[in-house]
Amino acid sequence: MIPPNASLVKYDNPVLVSRNTDKKTPRAKSLKTSPTPPASTGPIPLPPAKQKLSPVDAKAAQQTDEILNSILPPREWTENGQLWVQQVSSTPATRLDVVNLQEELDRRLQQRQARETGICPVRRELYSQCFDELIRQVTINCAERGLLLLRVRDEIRMTIAAYQTLYESSVAFGMRKALQAEQGKTDMEKKVDQLENEKRDLEKQVNELKAKCDQIEKRAAEQRQVEEKKHTEEIQFLKRTNQQLKKVIILQLKNWMLSPQGSGTGFVISRIGTHAEPDAR
């Protein structure tokens, strides 16, 4: 027979129930067993013989067994097509049993390298088994106290399950927010790159427009200088032409005055010469 998984809860010796594995007792707890062959082929162990009890004690013991089976369902496993059942022990615990339970708990915590602080599934499993064993011990002595501890255990498990669900939801929410933030970061980085490209294009356009503006101003200044130079040359040319024309006119008038026809025009010529002299200078 393959021994079941080790547990801190005290069980009776396993009992062969049926060779048909399809039949299982209600509220039974299935166990996974190793496919290795049985260590021994000896006779099937029988449940320990119990002393005869009075009807009242027998009824109380039966009621206690039923309560124990409802609190801690029997374990079942199959071996070579045979169905084995192991019920929780109804033997009262002694002080030595409690001390041994504490030592066994410490030994398994150290053996399985359970963490002393923080979340640790191994530590939680071992303490849960220890609590179940304490409930078993208390239930044998007082069924009502055991049922009350059962309610406490179920409430603790429900609270832990709620916290676990909340933790998983928080982790999922955090991951979702992280993915959204990463996606938002990627979008913002793309937008920043786009704006930087637009900025570079605008700066390039500004530089081109500045170059064109400088070129236009330079051309306008050069054209203005050319026009001013041309205007100055035209003014000088006109002044020189004017002086030459005045000289020619004065010379002709002088010649005409010396002639017999111009004897009476000396005063006019003198006046013209007077006005012409400053221009000639």
Image (cartoon, rainbow, N blue to C red):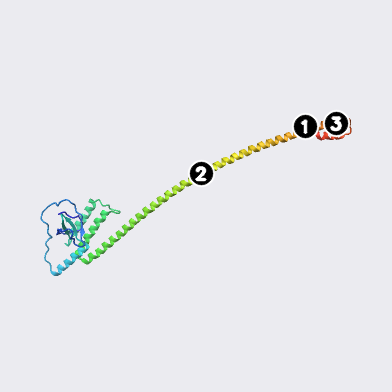
Secondary element under disc 2, as helix, strand or loop, is helix
Judged left or right of residue 170, residue 256 is right
| Location of residue 15 by image quarter | bottom left
Task: State the image coordinates of residue 29 (x, y, percent, origin top left).
Answer: 21, 59
Secondary element under disc 3, as helix, strand or loop, is helix
Query: How crowded is the residue under tag 1: few (<14 C-alpha within 10 Å), some, or many (20+)?
Result: few
Task: State the image coordinates of residue 148 (x, y, percent, origin top left).
Answer: 25, 65
Q: Which residue is mark 3?
A: 256
- Do labels 1 and 2 touch, CB within 8 Å? no
> Which label lies toward us, 1 or 3?
3
Q: Reading the chain from its start, which is encountered first: label 1 or label 2?
A: 2
Task: State the image coordinates of residue 265 (x, y, percent, origin top left).
Answer: 87, 34
Residue at 71 percent of width and 35 percent of height: 234
Judged left or right of residue 49, residue 161 is right
Query: How crowded is the residue under tag 2: few (<14 C-alpha within 10 Å), some, or many (20+)?
Result: few
In the image shown, does 63 or 112 lie closer to the viewer? 63
| Location of residue 145 by image quarter | bottom left
> Which label lies toward us, 2 or 3?
3
Task: State the image coordinates of residue 130 (x, y, percent, origin top left).
Answer: 23, 58
Q: Which residue is mark 2?
A: 201
- Do labels 2 and 3 touch, CB within 8 Å? no
In the image shown, does 114 or 256 lie closer to the viewer? 256
Q: Which residue is mark 1?
A: 244
State whether residue 256 is above or below residue 16.
above
- Type of amino acid under label 1: Gln
Query: How crowded is the residue under tag 3: few (<14 C-alpha within 10 Å), some, or many (20+)?
Result: some
Judged left or right of residue 148, residue 263 is right
